[in-house]
Image (spheres, rainbow, N blue to C red):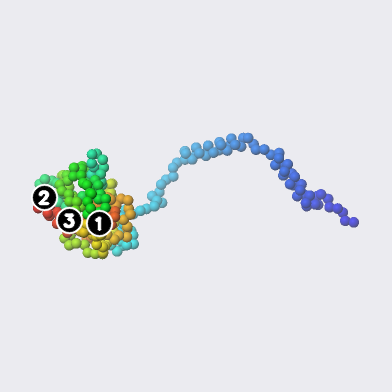
């Protein structure tokens, strides 16, 4: 006769016994009150150690690097050498200009030298008439509505880090130009303005100075595009792979447009909307007329 299995030999009984023991331990166990205190103390200690620990060393080579110029992009590889020389040469003539009215800042733009009076020790800066504009046209330049403040205070920001008071001697809203007289104690070099207009699809650089006098560079081509009904007929437009969605584009107003030889082919007059500039032939005519007739 087979013997009945004992409790030791019964696997179900052994499993039931373990469950009973676990249940009893679960009912009897209670957390140690000191554990909460120890946890808080350890958390506080970790916080203090973190605050007292030395700050991690910032290694420049690990930072995201953004080159200060645009010559690292693929579109500019072919003009990297000639473009760099042209930009560095023209940058010597490029300044920052700002205006204020009744003590309140009005606009910040760019400008460049176009004349030097050795006898009076004054330099003449060409910039955009937007510098003193207080109200833009609500619809287009042809419908009117633009307002200017010829009595606005004008400051010219020189490349040596100093500033000089500028005197507005002439402004022309139609061509969007303004001339500023500035006292300078040293002779200045003047850029070369090209008499022949830029050709369509010709490579150019748009240059400006931001509010820290940093050089702003935009590579572009003269676009096959005529001005529309809402713009001045003398405007020439850009086609740039850089785009014109930069919030700081307004600083380029009044800045230089140069060719790959460093010669001035125009002045930036609307980089925010269509990326347009005034060709150098018109700038030369305006300058010559002003010098001859002072009007």
Query: Residue 268: x and y, percent?
Result: 24, 55
Q: SS for tag 3? A: helix
The residue that disc 3 covers is 283
Q: Nearer the viewer, residue 19 or 145?
A: 145
Query: Residue 258: x and y, percent?
Result: 23, 58
* Mark identifier at residue 294: 2
Please give the name of the residue rendered at 11% of the width and 48% of the height, measured from the top-left corner.
118
Which picture quadrant has residue 164? top left
Q: Work out how far the residue at label 3 is from the one at label 2, CA to CA, in angstroms.
A: 15 Å
* Mark identifier at residue 230: 1
Crowd band around label 1 with a 10 angstrom C-alpha radius: few (<14), some (14–19), many (20+): few
Report whether residue 186 is seen: no
Q: Work out how far the residue at label 1 is from the one at label 2, CA to CA, in angstroms.
A: 29 Å
Mark before the other along the chain sequence, 1 or 2: 1
Please give the name of the residue rendered at 22% of the width and 47% of the height, measured from the top-left corner.
147
Query: Residue 195: x and y, percent?
Result: 16, 60
* Mark identifier at residue 135: none
Q: In front of the other: label 3 or label 1?
A: 1
Report whether residue 59 is seen: yes
Residue 116, placed above or below residue 203: above
Q: Nearer the viewer, residue 123 or 287?
A: 287
Mark before the other along the chain sequence, 3 or 2: 3
Left or right: where 12 falls relative to 4: left
Q: SS for tag 1? A: loop
Q: In front of the other: label 1 or label 2?
A: 1
Q: Work out how far the residue at label 3 is from the one at label 1, CA to CA, in angstroms.
A: 21 Å
């Amino acid at each position: 006769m087979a013997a009945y299995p004992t409790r030791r030999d019964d696997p179900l009984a052994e499993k039931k016994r373990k469950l009973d023991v676990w249940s009893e331990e679960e009912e009897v166990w209670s957390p140690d009150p000191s554990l909460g205190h120890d946890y808080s103390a350890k958390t506080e200690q970790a916080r203090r150690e973190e605050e007292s620990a030395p700050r991690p060393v910032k290694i420049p080579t690990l930072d995201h690097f953004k080159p200060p110029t645009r010559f690292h992009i693929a579109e500019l590889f072919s003009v990297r050498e000639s473009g760099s020389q042209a930009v560095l040469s023209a940058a010597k003539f490029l300044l920052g200009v700002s205006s204020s009215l009744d003590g309140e800042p009005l606009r910040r733009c760019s400008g460049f030298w176009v004349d030097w009076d050795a006898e009076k020790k004054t330099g003449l800066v060409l910039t955009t008439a937007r510098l003193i504009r207080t109200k833009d046209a609500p619809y287009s330049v042809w419908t009117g509505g633009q307002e200017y403040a010829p009595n606005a205070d004008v400051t010219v920001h020189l490349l040596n880090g100093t500033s000089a008071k500028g005197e507005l001697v002439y402004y022309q809203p139609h061509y969007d130009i303004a001339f500023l007289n500035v006292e300078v104690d040293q002779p200045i070099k003047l850029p070369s303005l090209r008499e022949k207009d830029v050709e369509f699809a010709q490579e150019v650089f748009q240059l400006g100075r931001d509010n820290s006098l940093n050089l702003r560079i935009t590579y572009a081509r003269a676009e096959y595009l005529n001005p529309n009904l809402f713009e001045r007929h003398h405007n020439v437009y850009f086609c740039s792979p850089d785009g014109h969605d930069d919030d700081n584009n307004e600083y380029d107003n009044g800045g230089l447009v140069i060719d790959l030889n460093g010669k001035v082919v125009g002045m930036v007059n609307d980089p925010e909307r269509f990326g347009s500039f005034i060709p150098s032939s018109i700038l030369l005519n305006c300058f010559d007329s002003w010098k001859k007739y002072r009007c």
